[in-house]
Amino acid sequence: MTEFTERVIAAIKKIPPARVCTYGGIAALAGNPSGARQVVRILNSMSRAHDLPWHRIINSRGRIAIKDADGFALQKSLLEQESVAVSAQGDVDLSIYLWRG
């Protein structure tokens, strides 16, 4: 595992309930501001193994990025269970819920 991957995992684990962070925000916290796509790959391959709160990661527009209907619904539901307001389109108000680390 690379040092960047370790830092990404550590940053994701720090996101508190009822807060979200962006892929780019996590990448920046891990030391590579242009590494948002790497964060996506890490989430896809390591969320279960490292028990990551993957549902707290959204895109820079404040929107759920999952295209699959079931995955979208699951992320929306998990965020709402933590009292994060999510629109029907998957929008989250970053001025309220964004965690900056």
Image (spheres, rainbow, N blue to C red):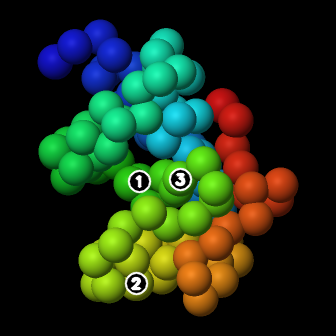
**C-alpha gap between disc 2 and disc 3:** 16 Å
Instruction: Tell me the residue that label 3 is attached to.
Output: 59
Q: Residues within 10 Å of mark 3 (few under 14, many from 20)?
A: some
Task: Name which residue type carries label 2.
Answer: Ala
Tag in front: 2 or 3: 3
Q: Secondary structure at mark 1?
A: loop
Residue at 64 percent of width and 72 percent of height: 91
Task: Name which residue type carries label 1.
Answer: Pro
Question: 101 and 16: which one is in front?
Answer: 101
Task: Name which residue type carries label 3.
Answer: Asn
Q: Earlier in the sequence, mark 1 or mark 3?
A: 1
Look at the image and tell me in which quarter the N terminus lies: top left
Residue 79 percent across, percent down from the top left: 55, 71
**In this picture, residue 57 sits left or right of residue 67:** right
Q: Earlier in the sequence, mark 2 or mark 1?
A: 1
Q: Which image quadrant is residue 92 in?
A: bottom right
Residue 53 percent across, percent down from the top left: 41, 53
Viewer can see residue 38: yes
Look at the image and tell me in which quarter the C terminus lies: top right
Question: 81 and 69: which one is in front?
Answer: 69
Viewer can see residue 83: no
